[in-house]
Image (tube, grey):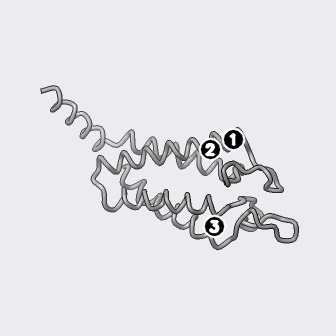
Amino acid sequence: MARLYAQFGAVVFLAVGLGGLLTGDAGTLLHHQPEGNVGPVALHLTYVRDVLDLLIGAALALAGFRASDRVAGEIVVTVGVVLLLLAVVGFAHPDDAAASRAVAGLHMTTPMNIFDAVAGALACLCALGDPATAAGTSASSAAEKR
């Protein structure tokens, strides 16, 4: 299940990262409005967030297409924890319509926080509920006991 999530997540995060690079940076004002939005949805994407999405997509691509099941599960759970931390920070320190409340170059809007929370929770559930990863862990722990 972790491998399937990694494959799907790689496509989504790479598309979001590349799309964000094309929509512009929220730090740039055009007609007194920040760029980095998709239509009427205020995402306030920045180049920092786009690079982060591309790195997450690359890690998930590695997990989904090249890594062993155990390593794929570890990568997916790590990505899930990072996304959940981004969501928690974003909900605790939300951005405003003028894109003036960035945290480390990231604008934490509500749609992005919801996306991060859902993607992170699904990643953790897929990685921790994966029978192949759990079987590998119990087999290795049984071998260590001998």
Amino acid type of the residue tagged 1 in the rendering: Phe
Left or right, 14 with respect to 145, comes to right
The residue furthest right is 32
Instruction: Residue 42: give its label.
Output: none
Spot occupied by residue 135 in the image (x, y as percentages of width and height): 25, 38
- Sooner in the amino-acid sequence: mark 3 or mark 2: 3
Q: Give me the residue at 48% from left, 64% from top.
A: 11
Q: Is residue 131 or residue 23 the one in the foreground?
A: 23
The residue furthest left is 146
Please tell me whether residue 81 is drawn above or below residue 36 in the rendered image: above
Spot occupied by residue 55 in the image (x, y as percentages of width and height): 49, 59
Q: Give me the residue at 84% from left, 65% from top.
A: 33
Query: Is there a contact, CB below 8 Å, between mark 1 and mark 3?
Result: no
Give the spatial CA distance, label 3 vs label 2.
Answer: 18 Å
Query: Is there a contact, CB below 8 Å, between mark 2 and mark 1?
Result: yes
Q: At numbered mark 2, what does the secondary structure look like: helix, strand or loop?
A: helix
Say few, some or many: other residues with alpha carbon within 10 Å of mark 1 (under 14 / 14 to 19 / 20 or more).
some
Q: At numbered mark 3, what does the secondary structure look like: helix, strand or loop?
A: helix
Amino acid type of the residue tagged 2 in the rendering: Ala
Say few, some or many: other residues with alpha carbon within 10 Å of mark 3 (under 14 / 14 to 19 / 20 or more).
many
Q: Which residue is mark 2?
A: 87
Instruction: Residue 20: give its label.
Output: 3
Quarter holding residue 98:
bottom right
Q: Which residue is mark 1?
A: 91
